[in-house]
Image (cartoon, grey):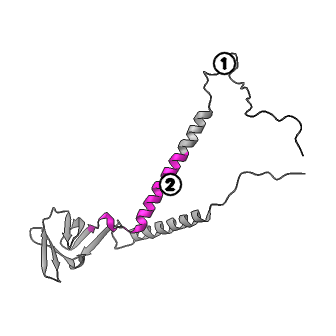
Amino acid sequence: MARKMRVGNRRRAPVWLMIAAALALFLTVYEGYRMIMPFVARDPLYHEVNFGQRVIDDWQYEGENEEGYLLFYNPINGDRAMLPPQSRLFGADGKWVVIEHADAASLTYAEPLEAAPWYVYLLLLAAIGAGAWWAVKRVRVVRGKRMRTRSVRRRGLAEPVGVRRLRRRFKPRRGSRPS
């Protein structure tokens, strides 16, 4: 009788792994679309506002004055804020943003890292975990190969280089095998 030859151990990935991979793929495509979509800043943490639009809570960007100072206005209580042209931070109402670029008509700013969505942190943690898992697995494989190789110096000179003595790992069984 001819036996079927098995060419490997074909196993399916666990369901939780497939769900996690599908979720990661969906979030990657979603964030990629948001990043290349027209009229949206390149970085997901960057925001671009025009003259009169809100930056922090009710604070609106009012452009630049003649000297290049950045102007902000809060219409609720009538407060005004003026920042020097080289300023990189704007803080109001206990919050702050990092100013990336400003001109007379528009302002590009980034929210602090705490404002990133939760799934960004989840993806970063998953990537770090996958990298650590791969590194540990790789070290174990390399260490195993290193442990199994024999040095040329340890071989006796009476033994030819091409001939290797077979060394049995286990004692052979005495008697016949049961069928």
| 166 horizontally vs 28: left or right | right
Amino acid identity at mark 2: Ala
- Say what amino acid the circle numbered 1 marks: Gly
The local secondary structure at tag 1 comes to loop
Which residue appears at 50% of the width and 65% of the height?
Answer: 24
For the view shown, which residue lies furthest in the front direction? 174
Our reading of the magenta stretch's main secondary structure is: helix
Query: Residue at horizontal 44%, vertical 59%?
Result: 125
The boundaries of the magenta stretch are 109-137
The secondary structure type at the circle numbered 2 is helix
- Binning the other alpha carbons within 10 Å of mark 1 as few (below 14), some (14 to 19) or many (20 upward) gives few
Q: Give how far apart the Cα atoms at labels 1 and 2 are.
A: 44 Å
Residue at horizontal 56 percent and vertical 42 percent from the top: 140
Count all numbered tags in the image, as a single digit. 2
Tell me the quarter of the picture where residue 72 sits. bottom left
Q: Percent x, y for residue 10?
A: 70, 56
86 magenta-colored: no
Closer-to-camera residue (138/99): 138
Measuring 30% from the left and 71% from the top, which residue is drawn there?
47
Q: Position of residue 133 (x, y in %)?
A: 52, 51
Q: Is residue 157 left or right of residue 93?
A: right
Residue 115 figure quarter? bottom left
State the mark number for residue 130: 2
For residue 3, above or below residue 170: below
Q: Residues within 10 Å of mark 2 (few under 14, many from 20)?
A: few
| Rendered image: mark on residue 156 | 1
Above or below residue 165? Residue 128 is below
